Structure formats: structure tokens, C-alpha cells
Image: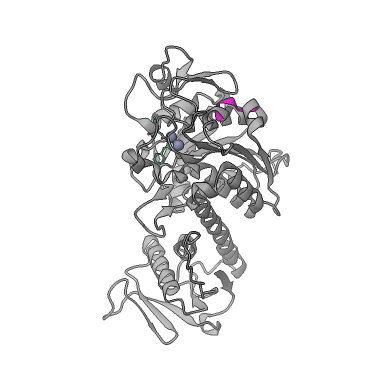
Amino acid sequence: MKISFINKQIKDIESDLEIILLKNHKYLKVNDLFIKDTKFYVKIANFKHYTLTKTFTNTIQYISKINKYKSIKITLYGISDKKLQALIDGLILGIYNFTKYQSEVKNLKLQDVFIANEDYKNTQLSYEKIKMKIENLIIINTNINLVRDMINSVAQDTTPIKISNWIKEEVKNTDIECIIKDNSYIKKELPAFYDISKGSINKPRLVHLKYNENKGYKKIVLIGKGVTFDTGGISLKPSAYMYDMRLDKAGAVTIFGIIKSIHDLKLPIEVHAMLGFSENMISNNAYKPGDVIKTRNGKSIEIMNTDAEGRILLADLFEYSQDKIKQIDYIFDYATLTGSVSGAIGQYSAGLIGHNTQLKNKMIKASNKVDEWYVNLPFNRYFFEDSYKSAIADFTNIPTSSIGGGTIMGGVFINNFLKNKYKNKWLHIDIACVAFIKNSWKYHEFGATGFGVKSSINLIRRLTKTGLIKKDGI
Ligand code: BES
Ligand code: ZN
Ligand code: ZN
């Protein structure tokens, strides 16, 4: 399905069907939709952002269900900037369907959605400007659907090697550089990452994606947990909590979506994305409770629970990234780190942790503007010493002497691997609650949401606008 913004009035565009939103109509009930000849009437309660998003989602889903029309057209209905997003999100995220594993998939007849250049609220904006806004939204949403596809794909199809190759393929003809490091490199350079991966015959991979290196822009490092399946290891998960653990690669896949969008939008910032792919399996070679393992920089961790593997992977990725990349301006990590985040904040938001209140607030503001939600979780780095006490090693991998606050404690653990100079430049985002859902809401059906791409892009856009353009001041 292709969305095009046409510099014509709606009456001058040829298509099979015209979408008409009706607000005040005596006989129709809200959300009623019906088709008469070439007109598709949709009764809408109001023109608020959320209602518009839902309406466009329902409309496009209805049209794809009927599967009869090749092209549709719509005007801008007096909407403006944020509501333009409602239209494009509703159309692209709303029509997403994960059909990879179905034997009979109908071909979508709908090929073209034409948006007429008519009735835009901000009449000052030229056709070119609105077109650019629409194209940018299309880029981001298309990448979100790719992220959804990757997360939804099952573990046997997204082993560390397979998902790394898929990502390599996606960036093949772009300006993103893709370096993939194999098992023996990981063993030498990221020993803790290696240890948590030992139990699987599907060997780990480290994917380092780079964009705009050495061009004088400020630098952001994105770090992602990519556990392609999390059985819990020897500390095995109960079945009911295990079957959907293909979602545990969401952090790494999300940051792939972010760097790809930054590239496609040509944002002026240097980005490094560090994706750690590993399968947490149970086998006679798996790491065990009671083992003591060492991180890249020699810190020893006593394993109390092999299911807390993500933080160990992140520990090594943090140390590695800070060693290899100089003078970092921002570090964001995305991870499905703790099951307890859902209990704390529900399924619609991500948990946000960091030292820098201003930066956190910026993220919260930037995300709200694009319809994503972050909850600020309080953070105290001194919780670490009291909680992660080990009798034999430097520390443990789960709290031994405190209870509760699992998500905060996860953040407190990985903070330990961050150099002091980067404390204020870091955001930790726990997406265990929101990355993958079982109840549909808004434009999300069962499965991966693709959460995080939109908000990070908006934040990075804002950061690049406010002085963060070129180091030399251009
Ligand atoms: N991958 C899980 C977290 C998770 C749970 C993500 C549910 C998505 C949905 C993670 O590796 C894990 O198991 N964490 C443990 C940590 C605990 C042992 C301290 C958890 O949350 O129970
Ligand atoms: Zn786990
Ligand atoms: Zn995990």
C-alpha cells in the first residue's frame, strides 16, 4: 500500500473510493461506517487526536477486510500537524497484519491511498512542507512495521545469526555500516555476554551499526538487549511465562528501527547501535546458578538466577561501547529487562530510568507528542551496594538483600557499568511491558507494538535542533 500526497483537490483525484468523515449526522451512530457507491461514510465523534487515530485505523482495517478497492482518497479535513500524524499512524500501523506463518494469505487489493492537498488547517504551509511531513511519518511508521515483523518472527527464524543477517540485508544499500562480530570475538571481548550464551547451539552475535561516523556531529550510542529466546536458563521460567519469550529481542530490534529511521530521515547526528543477540537456553553447557562470571573489565558477578541474563548482557555491552567509542554525548539503552515493570506501570508505557531529570523530562515530553508514554521511575545509584551483596564475588546478578522494585533495581544494576562521565547522558528504557501485547488497543493487534522508535526519533530531533547540530558550531 502506497500513500501519496497529491497537489489537487479531492474532486480532481481519481480513485475507487472516497472516505468521508461525518461528525453531525442524525441517523448514524458514532463509529458507524457504510459504503454507498464510491463514497465511504464514517461517523466520527470528534476531531481529537485519539479519535482520529482510531477512526483511520478502523477505516483502513474495514477496507482491507472487504478487499475490493484498489485505491482510496481522502482530504485533510481541517487537520494540522499532530493530527496529520493520527492519519498516517492510523493508516500504516492500523493496516499491519502479521501473516508470515499463515498458509492462506489474501493479497491486499488496496494499492494506493491518495491524500488531497485540500483543507489543511495551517494554510501557511506549502504543499512541499506538508508533503515532507507526510513522507517523514511514512518513513517512521514503515520502520515500526519492520520492527514489529522482526519481533513477531519466532525464535527458530530469528536465532542470533539469522536476525543479524536479516538486519545486514535491510541496511545493505544504505549509508549504515554493519559490522557483525561472532562467537569467538565475543568470547574474547565480551566474556559475560559469552557466558550467558553458552547454553545454546545458536551462537551469539554482536551487531554494531554505524551512521554518520566522524562527520563532526554529536554522538549517540544506542544499546539493545537482543535475547532471541529467553527460557530463563537453568532457573527455568514456568511455561506460561515462557512461550512468548521471542519478544525478548525487542530492545535490540527497536534500536535497529531507530538508527534506520535516523538514516532514512537524514538526521544530523552520529549514531552507533550496539545489538547483543543471544539465546538463553538450558543445556549441559549452560551457565548455572552459583557460577561466578567476569565482565569485560574484570568485575565478578555471582549468578543467583540465570533468568536475570539481560542485565549481564547489557553490562558487557556498556563496557565494550564505552571502550570502543570515544566522547559519547548520549547513551540510551532499550531492553525487555524485568517482568515486574508491567505490575508497576501497566502495559501502555515504558519505564524510564536515569540520573538526569532534565533529559528524562525531555523524553517524556517528546514521547507524548508522538503518542508514546514513558513513566519516570525514581532512581538511586546507592541502592546497589545494599542490594546486590555477594559472599564470594563483587556482586550478584539479582538483589539478595532487598525486595521489590525489580525494574528500578535492574536499572541500578546496569548503572554500575557506566563511567561517571556518562551518568548524566544516559537513559535506560525498560520495554518489557509494552513491547508485546496480548490485548489489542489503538492500532496494535496481538504481538509486537514497535514501541520506542517514534519517541526516540522525536527526542533526537529535538536534541539536534537545540544546539546539538555540529560540534564546530555550524
Ligand atoms: N526477559 C525477562 C523479562 C521479561 C518478562 C520480559 C516478561 C517480558 C515479559 C528477563 O530476562 C527476566 O526474566 N527478568 C527477571 C529478573 C528477575 C530474575 C530478577 C524477571 O523479571 O522476573
Ligand atoms: Zn530472563
Ligand atoms: Zn530476558
Examine the image and state in which quarter residue 382 appears: top left
Judging depth in this view, the residue of 94 and 26 nearest the camera is 94
In the picture, the quarter occupied by the N terminus is: bottom right
Examine the image and state in which quarter residue 90 appears: bottom left
Q: Can residue 161 be seen in this view?
A: yes
Q: Residue at x 38, y 59 (%)?
A: 442
> Which residue occupies the extreme top position in the image?
391
Q: In the rendered view, does 70 fall on the left or right side of 177? A: left
Figure colour scheme: one colour
Say whether residue 192 is magenta: yes
In the picture, the quarter occupied by the C terminus is: top right
Q: Is residue 159 above or below residue 264?
A: above
Q: Can residue 378 be seen in this view?
A: no
Rendered-image quarter of ligand 2: top left
Coordinates of residue 440 in the picture (x, y in percent): 36, 57
Coordinates of residue 206 in the picture (x, y in percent): 61, 37
Q: In this view, does 25 lie above or below 172?
A: below
How would you classify the magenta stretch by its main secondary structure? helix
Give the number of marks.
Answer: 0
Q: Residue at x 34, y 43 (%)?
A: 240
Say whether residue 134 is magenta: no
Judging depth in this view, the residue of 268 and 454 nearest the camera is 454
Examine the image and state in which quarter residue 111 appears: bottom right
Coordinates of residue 144 in the picture (x, y in percent): 52, 54
Judging depth in this view, the residue of 58 and 45 nearest the camera is 58
> Which residue occupies the extreme bottom position in the image?
37
Q: In the rendered view, does 151 fall on the left or right side of 163? A: left
Q: Which residue is drawn at 52% across and 30% down?
A: 196
Q: In this view, does 346 lie above or below 134?
A: above
Residue stretch in magenta: 189-193
Coordinates of residue 363 in the picture (x, y in percent): 47, 43
